[in-house]
Image: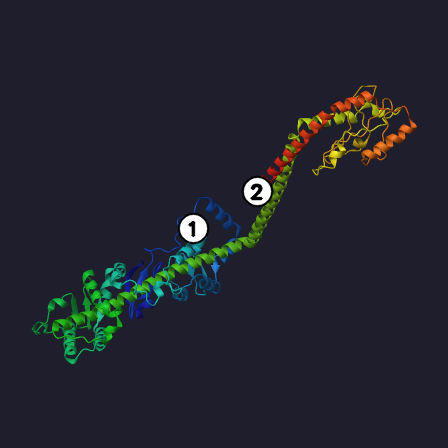
Amino acid sequence: MARLTNYYRSEEIPYVTLARRQLPIIAGHDLMMLMDLNSKGLAIDNPPARGKELDEFTRKYNILSPDELKTSLEVKSADLIPIISQTVQCVGCRRSVERLFYQLMLSGHHTLDPLVIKTNGILTIAEDKMKVPRFVCTLLRRHNSTLSALLDNQTKNKKNSRCTLHSLDSFRSRPFSETWREIWGSMKQRCREELSVIETKELLEILENYLRKHKFCQDCRTKVEKAYTLLVDDTNSSKEKGFVSALYSNIKQCREHKHIHLLTKADFIESLIKRAEPEIIGSNLMRQRERHAKTLEIAQEEVLTCVGMCIYERLRRIYISLREEERACQVLAAVGVHALSRSFDTAVEQKQGISKLELLCQEMSRVEKAKEHKKEQKKLKKKKKKSVKKNQENAFEAETKSEPEVEIEDELNDLLNCPCKSNSNNACSKSIDGGYASENSQTNSRTVSLLNSPEGSEVSCSDGLCNHEQQSGIDMALNNDTYNLNNFEKPHDCRHYVKNQNSTMSLQQMLDGLQADEEKETDCYIPDEVVLEFKNRENKIKQLREELRENLRQNFDKMCKTYVRNCND
């Protein structure tokens, strides 16, 4: 809490010279006390700036010319008052800050030094301090956090936005008898002595209201008035019956100036406040209650209660004034520094050609681009994951092929690459059905075609049909899980019975073609030993076919289970 260092009367204000960070406050009807903030300090008193923060501010400071710097560190009242209205929520605090601003503008007091409020309503910094970059940086640093902390730390009323200082029931939550020592301890001794002087006229007015409030009877009223007279004009108090001089021992009379002096001991002041507090903040039901003073001693105690009410009201008035002015000084200083910092930053940004709004737009654009890039990366990652999954499925299918299947594919490749295909002198004229056509009509499984290329529809040469290389082979087209032995070529004259290489001919069409060629060429035949060899291998082919079919079914089931498990994951 700020200190109260001196006092003076209202008529003496024009002749009082205030020092740095001092302000007069109202202590009574015509009593003023001097508040000193030097010991308390202001919220804008920050530790000296240093390091990178100081270097960055110095760079901005040097951008501006002396005239531009001076203009940037000035805020007009028309710009400052709206900031006060926007930041200060409590109506009482807002009015106090505005009143203090105009008071300092008219008086010229250096209460907020180094801030100066000129008579034209411009808030600025002292010229000698403005020339030092380190000092200006220290003053303007952390202006946002300083103002926010100052306003947020105020205790507010739950029902409205008023602070407890300006709330109607501010003293009901905590009795003043517990807080009066704060204001008493902030006073110097001469202020305490001046505060303890009570005019007899003021005390008599309080006493009259007190007697009327409690409806004293005429006899009791007379005794109380007698006790008052003995207090302010002690002539023959010792001769009065029932008078207790110890009750008035800490009060001195001053008949010449018509006032009394209270002893400035804290214990005596506390006893007076405790007497007066129930009367001031007590229940209103006591107004209807009759009081009595049958003896002079009780009448003396009633008079002391009125004295306590007088000192109680004085201390509470000073307490409120001191807290209110102190709060107004702190808030006005914080708001002023906040406004100066904004003005300085605006001037620097205009000189640099870029504003905070543009920086914000650039930052937002950068964030949006980063989001778009992240989204694209996510899409590519998802696409890559699908591709890897597909490759794994293909590799799994290739790995799960059975050895009989591979052997059959190799055998078919040998048959398709038979040298007799290049020999056009003789042609194979007969087609042999391996006995799988009937089975083809009994199965409803998937179609697997190992010969789906144009070469697969040609007449194949098997081992033993071509006499020039003694090869044995079977041209098998796996259609509806059926191997079809299409054709065999004749040695030295391997002619093709597929009229259209882009389409696959049926076994009957191939056979008809072979029969037509047999009529033209009687020397095209299949030796009996080749047919016999094929029949001997028929059982082996059937066995291989069943194994292949079972392996394909198992592999397909595994692939389905793997796909379902990956989808669930």
Which residue is more in the foreground, 108 or 520?
520
| x and y, in percent, of residue 383 in the image | 63, 41
Where, quadrant-wise, is the N terminus in this rendering?
A: bottom left
Q: Amino acid at mark 2?
A: Asn
Q: Residues within 10 Å of mark 2 (few under 14, many from 20)?
A: few
Tell whether label 1 touches label 2 (CB within 8 Å). no
Provide the residue designation for mark 2: 568
Provide the residue designation for mark 1: 138
> Residue drawn 13% across and 66% down?
249
Whether residue 104 is visible: no
**SS at mark 1 in the image:** helix
Which residue is more in the foreground, 482 or 23?
482
Which residue is more in the foreground, 261 or 508?
508
**Image quadrant of residue 527?**
top right
> From what the image shows, is residue 292 above or below residue 346?
below
Question: In the rendering, which numbered label is found on residue 111?
Answer: none
**SS at mark 2 in the image:** helix
Q: Amino acid at mark 1?
A: Thr
Which residue is more in the foreground, 520 or 70?
520
Instruction: Residue lying at the far bottom in this picture: please name it.
Output: 218
> From what the image shows, is residue 514 above or below residue 27?
above
Where, quadrant-wise, is the C terminus in this rendering?
A: top right
Q: Residues within 10 Å of mark 1 (few under 14, many from 20)?
A: many
| x and y, in percent, of residue 414 in the image | 76, 24
First in residue order: circle 2 vs circle 1: 1
**Image quadrant of residue 248?**
bottom left
Q: CA distance from mark 2 to mark 1?
A: 62 Å
> Residue drawn 89% across and 31% down?
516
